Each structure stands twice: as structure tokens, then as C-alpha cells.
Image (cartoon, rainbow, N blue to C red):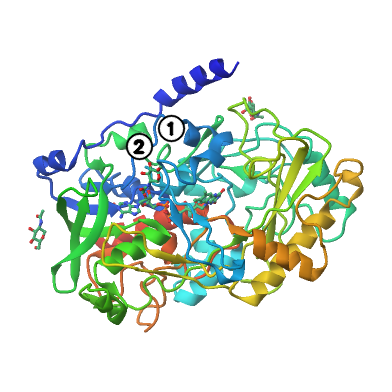
Amino acid sequence: MARLLLAGILALSTTLCSGIIVENAAALQALKINFDFIVVGGGTAGNVVANRLSDNPGTMVLLLEAGGSNADVLNIIVPFYAPRATPDTAQDWNYTTTAQVGLNGRSVTYNRGFVLGGSSSVNYMVYTRGSMDDFDRWAKVTGDEGWSWESLYPYFLKNEDFTSNTTGHYDPSVHGYSGINTVSLSGYPTPIDSRIIDTTTQLDGYPFNLDMNSGNPIGIGWGQATIKDGSRSSSATSYLGSQYIARPNLHVLLNARVTRVLQTATGVVRSVEFVQDLDGPKYTVNATKEVILSAGSIGSPNILLHSGIGDSSALTELGISSVHNLPAVGQKSHRPLLVIPAIPCQLNRYLGHRDAQRHVVGGGVHRVEYRSHGSSGPTSAHYELIFCNGMLPPPPATGNFMSILPVVVSPASRGSITLGSNDPLADPLINPNLLGADVDLVIMREAVKSAIRYTTAPAWDGYVLSTLGLTDTSDAGIEAYIRANAGTIYHPVGSVAMSPKGASWGALNPDLTVKGLTGIRVVDMSIVPFIPAAHTQVSAYIIGERASDLIKQTWGIN
Ligand SMILES: Cc1cc2nc3c(=O)[nH]c(=O)nc-3n(C[C@H](O)[C@H](O)[C@H](O)COP(=O)(O)OP(=O)(O)OC[C@H]3O[C@@H](n4cnc5c(N)ncnc54)[C@H](O)[C@@H]3O)c2cc1C
Ligand SMILES: *[C@@H]1O[C@H](CO)[C@@H](O)[C@H](O)[C@H]1NC(C)=O
Ligand SMILES: *[C@@H]1O[C@H](CO)[C@@H](O)[C@H](O)[C@H]1NC(C)=O
Ligand SMILES: *[C@@H]1O[C@H](CO)[C@@H](O)[C@H](O)[C@H]1NC(C)=O
């Protein structure tokens, strides 16, 4: 049975093989092309930009990605295998945070996709847009109405190809059906589904929400995920699908790790330096119009800092010559938290390991509960409950489990990305400052209580037997449990954040150009001034979409 399935998946994966990819740096140089745009990082947002800019056949686009191909990697194709895609795999950057004071001094792994598609190739595929208030706050903070929910709404639809049709499980009027990235409801039922939904009518405080992607995500509803016909839909399979990657004006170089961006004239940054082997030669390539940094919330500040663009005194101390003093680079990042109290129950744990069509834990079967108390506004959440039928991480040898993962989605803690050395190939220092703000601990504590309360509804009678892990349910007991067990669900943002044009703070203008420099923009989750109370891949996609339009406007490209 297992062998049969493997054969099926391999046959499927061959259809994902990419078309035109430049073999290596020498082959790239031999082409002698003047690229209009160089996109650094073939991740979630970067692939959107590469796609949209190259849809004009006269525009030459080069995409540089540090990782390898997404094709034929089972752990990133099969949704159920997502927990195997990271950490410490060939598709992961293998980062670890600094010791976290709020977590009793623990360090936690900090996963990031190191592969075409970036984190969209290794994430858990949960599709949540966030709330109206989240985006309206971006507009307010940057002074640019273009970042409001209403202005961005067409981009959600442009991104999305919603393929499910189960009446009563979603609102058809809020989805896009002709976009590029596939979104679907769960493809299979699990024994906890009806219990989760029934609870909304049995307990106060958990209203049923027909569609959590309408701009008002508060409540409990059916989960949506970036899954197409049982396989992961990533920015690599969608925006770089075979019909796009075959464009003669789009060149993609894999295993190209960008070390720095360089000035081509004072204040003009249009040159990119990269290596293919960690101890190999450095190459440079220049853009005639713009360099677009899409290396993600860790990668983009890391590249800028090594290029001398950041806090000049901190850089000078490390022996990096300052090119442009911009203290906001790397100085603000927001990360949601995750703790895992697992609740054993009497039914099956891990239904159907062998079924490739099934959604991953946290993808198709997740239900979220949002509550608002002063996050970005009334439509926005403080915490989320993710339900999964099974246990994450791997369960004990015996017993049957379901899990509820409480997540603080509007954390107040602020972290930083800084450098420990002047070696551009060394890992940066990643300090998410988890639980650094007291309010985050309070919200997490309430989220844990809420998760426990949820299973006291009649819908769960005789189903949930006991709670694993958490034994002392006093406030102090829960807080101690959180500090000892909390991790993160990998939503860093804001490390190269935008601010109003002319503001003395922030790193980017609202059109994503780097303050004080010409020729360079940043387009990925690092630009976000406040984290959306959601999972962050959808934001990354629509940032890529809006940025592409901004870039085309600047250069008069249709
Ligand atoms: C394990 C995990 C689970 C997650 N689960 C979910 C989920 O279920 N739902 C959800 O919405 N979000 C989820 N997220 C978060 C979401 O995937 C990210 O917020 C989003 O994909 C980030 O997009 P990005 O474009 O900013 O960066 P990325 O997609 O990470 O892209 C950055 C790209 O740049 C490349 N790069 C970096 N440095 C360099 C360099 N020096 N040179 C060249 N290339 C470079 C990287 O290899 C990568 O391809 C998850 C993330 C992780 C890691
Ligand atoms: C992460 O570790 C894996 C396994 O050791 C390795 O193959 C991969 O190249 C590492 N990632 C990076 C960015 O070095
Ligand atoms: C709903 O989707 C299923 C499977 O994708 C398809 O077979 C069916 O025709 C669809 N029904 C409608 C009414 O669109
Ligand atoms: C890029 O531009 C710089 C500065 O103008 C120049 O010195 C360098 O040779 C150029 N690199 C390439 C590969 O053309």
C-alpha cells in the first residue's frame, strides 16, 4: 500500500518539474543579458514579483534563490508531510533563536524555507487573510490608503483560485476564482469536525463564522488551505508554474546566495553580489532599473546590514563600512507564539498517514477562534485556537490524541535581527523576544484556558478523557507551563518596516523603496509595520501583488 502511494506521488511530482532555469553563474554571465530587475529570494512574495514583472515580454527579470528546486521533494509536495519539511532539512535555513528570557532561557528553532517557493514551500498551508482593521492600521501608520483592506481586496482575489464548493462551509462572495494560488476547504472529514462546529452553539463566546477570510475573522469556522488537488500550492508551483517559468524574459538561478547589495553610484543600489558555493567565488550582477529584495524577514535585513545599510555605529563596530545609516533595519520584528497542550481523547490519533490527499494537521481541519480586546480593532483577534486531529509534535507511543494549539496572534513583544559578525554567510542573531511583553503572557494564559474550556461543551462528552502535559491549571501553573513549553509558529514581520514618506523612523517608504536610497525596494513580510492577526502567507502574496503594480507604475510598464 505504501509503495503504491509513493509511485503515485512521484508520477505527480514530475508534472511539477520546472522549465527554464539557468544552470549556474557562468551560464548566466555568458547570456550577457541586461536585466531590468533582479529579484533576490524566490520565496512567497519574490515569486509573485518575478511573475508579474515578466508578464511584459519586453521586461528582463532575473530571480536569484539561495535554496534549490522544489520539484520532487515529497515532504513539501504532500500536505500531510509538512511537519517533516522543517526543521533542519535540506529545505530549511536551520536557524535557532538567541536564548529567550521569556521562555526560561530556552532557544527555539526558527524555521524558514530554503528552497524555491521559500516559506510557502515548507509552511503548514493555513490560508487566513487577517482582519479589515489589520490592514486599515497599515494604511493609517504609513499614510498610504493603498494599504487599506478595501484597496488591497482586489489583490486577495487576484492571488486566489478557490476550488471548493461545500455549501455552508464558506462564503462564495468573498473569494477569487481565477487567481494563481489554489485555496481549498479540507478534502476529508475527521471525527472532531462536527464537535468543533457544534460547540459554537453550545458555549457562549465562540460564534460560528461562515468564512474567516471575509475581513472579519472572529469566531469558529471551517479551515481553508493552500492545497490543489491534494498537493501543496506554493508560490513555486503557482506563480512559477510551467507556463510562467518558460517565459524567455524570466531567468531563475538556484543555489545563488546573495551576500550583499552594492552601490553603482553614491546612493544608488543596483548591484547584487552572490556566491554559489559557500567557499566559492563571488559574482556580481547589475539591474538597469531596480533590485528587489524578497529574502524574507530574516534574509532581507541580513543582506542590508552586511551591505552597510543599517545602524552605522553598530555596523562599524563589526568592521562593516557604513553605506547608509538606517537604524530601523532589523530592529523590529513581531512573532506570534505557540504552545502545545495536547488533549488525549478516545478516538483515533493520526487518521490515514498513508493518504496523500489529506490535509496536513493545521491545514484542512483547523478551526480558529478569535477574540478581540484592543488589538488593531474590533475585527481583529488576540489569539487563535488551532484544532488538529492528532498530535503535534510526534505523540507518545500509545494513546489517541487531538491537539488544540493556542496562538497569540497580536503579540506586543518586539524582537530584533542583528549581526554577530561581518561574515555574510554566518547566521544573523535572531531575537524574537518571545513573551517579552507581559500582555502576551496574559493573552496566552487566557488562550490556554479557552482551549480547555472549549472541550467542556456537550459535543465532547465521552470524547476527551484528559489533558496531557498541563496538570496545574491555576494561573501560575498555566504561566509556568507556557514558559516551559511555548514555541513559535514562524510569522516574523517588520524587520525592514515601512513608515510614512518623510518620516524619520522606519526603513521604507510606503511604496517600499528604501529610505534615502535609489534603485532598491524590499518586498516581503519584513515590510509590515504591524503583524496581521493571522497566518502570514496571504499577506506575503498580496504584498508581492501590490508591489508589482507599484514597480510597474514607476517604470511605466503595462
Ligand atoms: C514552518 C512554517 C510554517 C508556517 N505555516 C504557515 C501557515 O500554515 N500559514 C501561513 O499563512 N503562514 C505560515 N507560515 C508563515 C509564512 O509561510 C511566511 O510568513 C511567508 O511565507 C513569508 O514570505 P516571504 O516572502 O516574506 O519570505 P519567504 O517565503 O521565506 O521567502 C524568502 C526567500 O528568500 C530566500 N533567501 C533568503 N536569503 C537569501 C539570500 N541571501 N540570497 C538568496 N535568496 C535568499 C529564501 O531561501 C526564500 O526562498 C509558516 C512558516 C514556516 C516557516
Ligand atoms: C540545513 O541543514 C540541512 C541538513 O543538515 C542541510 O542539508 C542544509 O543545507 C542546511 N541549510 C542551510 C541553509 O545551510
Ligand atoms: C463541486 O466540486 C466537486 C469536486 O471538486 C465537483 O465534482 C462538483 O461538480 C462541484 N459542484 C458544483 C455544483 O460546482
Ligand atoms: C556593476 O556596476 C558596477 C558599478 O557601476 C561596476 O563596477 C560593475 O562592473 C558592474 N558589474 C557587472 C557584472 O556589470
Circle 2: element type: loop
Q: Residue at x 19, y 62 (%)?
A: 270
- Bin the neighbour count of mark 2 within 10 Å (Cα to Cα): few under 14, some 14-19, many 20 and up: some
For residue 511, what is the image quadrant?
bottom left
Locate ligand 2 by image quadrant: top left
Query: In this view of the protein, which residue sits in the foreground, 440 or 59?
Result: 440
Marks 2 & 1, CB-CB < 8 Å contact: yes
Q: Which mark is residue 69?
A: 2
Q: Which mark is residue 73?
A: 1
Q: Residue at x 14, y 74 (%)?
A: 266
Q: Residue at x 27, y 60 (%)?
A: 424
- Of all residues, the one furthest to the bottom in this rendering is 504
**Camera sees residue 381:** no
- Bin the neighbour count of mark 1 within 10 Å (Cα to Cα): few under 14, some 14-19, many 20 and up: some
Q: Which mark is residue 327?
A: none
For residue 380, what is the image quadrant?
bottom right
Q: Position of residue 48 (x, y in %)?
A: 38, 48
